[in-house]
Image (cartoon, rainbow, N blue to C red):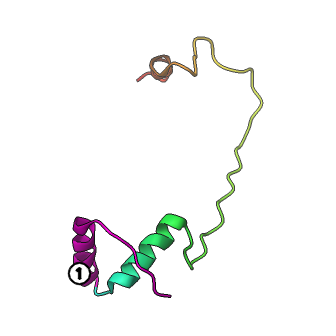
């Protein structure tokens, strides 16, 4: 489909140069850019991996450990 768009002169010059460097057309470059921005890629994204966390029984946090304080965690780890 044909359409008319107005582009900033600097963006158009840069896009034309990029198209030449990539051995493609300006139309193809604009199409790829719009697909990227709109997330309409023809390639399907892989399904997100499911992560299963291993849990163990225990008595809770060690005394003195504060999960909200990085410095205390480093101290407890001997770092």
The residue at the point 50 percent across, 88 percent down is 1
Q: Position of residue 23 (x, y in %)?
A: 28, 87
Say whether residue 12 is magenta: yes
The residue at the point 57 percent across, 72 percent down is 40
Q: Position of residue 74 (x, y in %)?
A: 45, 22
Q: Nearer the viewer, residue 4 or 11?
A: 4
**Residue identifier under label 1:** 21
Numbered disc total:
1
Q: Nearer the viewer, residue 8 or 22?
A: 8
The residue at the point 53 percent across, 66 percent down is 38
User: Dot 1 lies on which element?
Assistant: helix
Mark 1: few, some, or many residues within 10 Å (few <14, many ≥20)?
few
- Judged left or right of residue 34, residue 45 is right
Q: In the rendered structure, which segment of residues is drawn in magenta?
A: 1-22
Q: Position of residue 43 (x, y in %)?
A: 56, 78
The residue at the point 37 percent across, 78 percent down is 29
């Amino acid at each position: 489909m044909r359409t008319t768009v107005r582009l900033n002169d600097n963006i158009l010059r840069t896009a034309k140069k990029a198209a030449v460097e990539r051995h493609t057309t300006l139309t193809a470059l604009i199409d790829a850019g719009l697909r990227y921005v709109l997330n309409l890629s023809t390639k399907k994204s892989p399904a997100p991996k499911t992560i299963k966390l291993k849990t163990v029984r225990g008595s809770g946090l060690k005394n003195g450990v504060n999960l909200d304080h990085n410095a205390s965690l480093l101290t407890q780890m001997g770092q």
